[in-house]
Image (cartoon, helix red, strand yellow):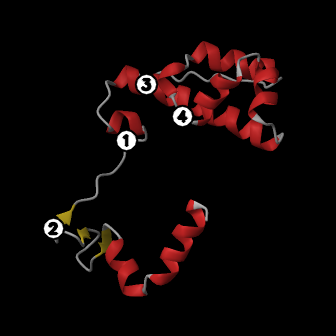
Amino acid sequence: MSYTRLRKRAAKRQGATSRSRAGATRKSSAGGKRVDSNVGINVGITHSSGNVFEDAGFPRDEARKLLIRSYLMSEIMALMESRQLTQARAATLFGVSQPRISDLMRGKIDLFSIDTLLAMLFRAGAHVLVKVQRKAA
């Protein structure tokens, strides 16, 4: 029997009580805070700066580059999905090897430069627009 079927059967055996206890957090009535149901402590909500990499502690310049790379990677994956490409066909279209496409699909962002991702999009016939905003003086 496959692993997926075993997991589905195990999930069916669990009752509603087990499922609710399995979750790490649940909403509390205490004004927007979450209570960790396993430990019973309050966990505050931190608002995002708009860049998940900056929020994770990367330096601002590096965080911006990572955000651009992640956006380009997601656009390549969306293009593959919309054209229903296999990894092998996508590799031919983008001019890279199939293992490179596998790395991209697994989100290995550190293996791709902005230039490489742009080149892949250009080979697929995508149009990329760059917008630069200056700070107000």
Circles 3 and 4 in contact, beta carbons < 8 Å: no
Provide the residue designation for mark 3: 136
Q: Residues within 10 Å of mark 4 (few under 14, many from 20)?
A: some
Residue sitting at 52 percent across and 68 percent down? 7
Q: Nearer the viewer, residue 29 or 86?
A: 86
Task: Name the secondary structure under disc 1.
Answer: loop
Left or right? Give the position of 135 relative to 111.
Answer: left
Looking at the rendered structure, the kind of residue marked 3 is Ala
x, y percent for residue 122: 77, 18
User: Which residue does the image show at 47% across and 26% down from the upper left?
Assistant: 66
Which of pointers 1 and 2 lies earlier in the amino acid sequence? 2
Q: Which mark is residue 24?
A: none
Of the residues tagged 3 and 1, which is closer to the observer? 1
C-alpha separation, residue under disc 1 versus residue under disc 2: 25 Å
* Image: 20 above or below 135: below
Give x and y (percent) for residue 26: 32, 73
Precedes in sequence: disc 4 or disc 2: 2
Other residues around mark 3 within 10 Å, as few (<14) / some (14–19) / many (≥20)? few
Within 10 Å of disc 2 (Cα), the crowding (few <14, some 14-19, many 20+) is few
Q: Earlier in the sequence, mark 4 or mark 1?
A: 1
Three-letter amino acid code of the residue under disc 1: Ser
Mark 1 closeness class: few <14, some 14–19, many ≥20 residues within 10 Å: few
Q: Where is residue 131 drawn, in percent x and y?
A: 61, 24
The residues tagged by marks 3 and 4 sit, at their Cα atoms, a distance apart of 35 Å
Q: Which mark is residue 107?
A: 4
> Residue sitting at 83 percent across and 23 percent down?
125
Quadrant for the C terminus in the image: top left
The image quarter containing residue 33 is bottom left
The earlier-in-sequence mark between 3 and 1 is: 1
* Quarter of the view holding residue 128: top right
| Label located before the other in sequence (2 or 3) | 2
